[in-house]
Image (cartoon, rainbow, N blue to C red):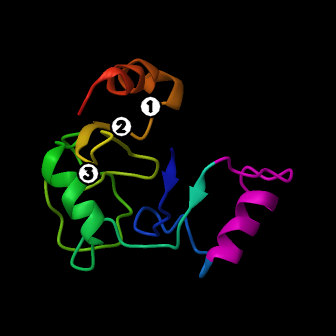
Amino acid sequence: MVLGFPCNSFGKQEPGGNGTEIMNGIRHVRPGGGFEPNFQIFKKIEVNGENEHPLFTYLKEFCPPTRSHFISNLFYTPLKNSDIRWNWEKFLITKSGKPYMRYDPGTVPSEIRTDIEFLLQQNL
């Protein structure tokens, strides 16, 4: 199962104010062409900073960052080493809900396939 959590902390790239605006942006702007994601997209939340959602505090506690540097155009404070660095960073979670691995924003989903198949075979 894939879950998407929009945020507006990285270059203000998610200006949509609610789920309808975000989905319209996906359908008609980027990527556009009537695109419909095949995963659930939740409401916009904070993934870093003083208002960070507890889910992301939990995920980052178990998985180290994928990059050592920060990119400019960040719109939150304070900066912490464990922070998500940019849009489309990914976390893989075990069947029991424990964070297993964290992936760089540039990682395409097909590159995670081996890890997913490994976890599906485990009794975790």
Asked whether the beta carbons under mark 1 and mark 3 sit within 8 Å of each other, the answer is no
Report whether 6 appears left or right of 83.
Answer: right
Q: Amino acid at mark 1?
A: Thr
Return the x and y of residue 33 as percentages of the image width and height.
Answer: 86, 50
Q: CA distance from mark 2 to mark 1?
A: 5 Å
- Whole-percent x, y for residue 26 in the image: 71, 59
In the rendered image, which residue does mark 3 sit on?
70
Q: Amino acid at mark 2?
A: Asp
Front in this rendered view, residue 39 or 94: 94
What residue is at 42 percent from the left and 41 percent from the top?
105
- Asked if residue 49 lies in the magenta stretch, the reply is no
| Magenta part of the chain | 19-38
Label whose residue precedes the other's in the sequence (2 or 3): 3
The residue pinned by badge 1 equals 107
**Residue most extreme to the front:** 123
How far apart marks 1 and 3 lie (CA) works out to: 17 Å
Visible residue check, residue 80: yes
Q: Secondary structure beneath disc 2?
A: loop
Residue depicted at 40% across the width and 17% down the height: 114
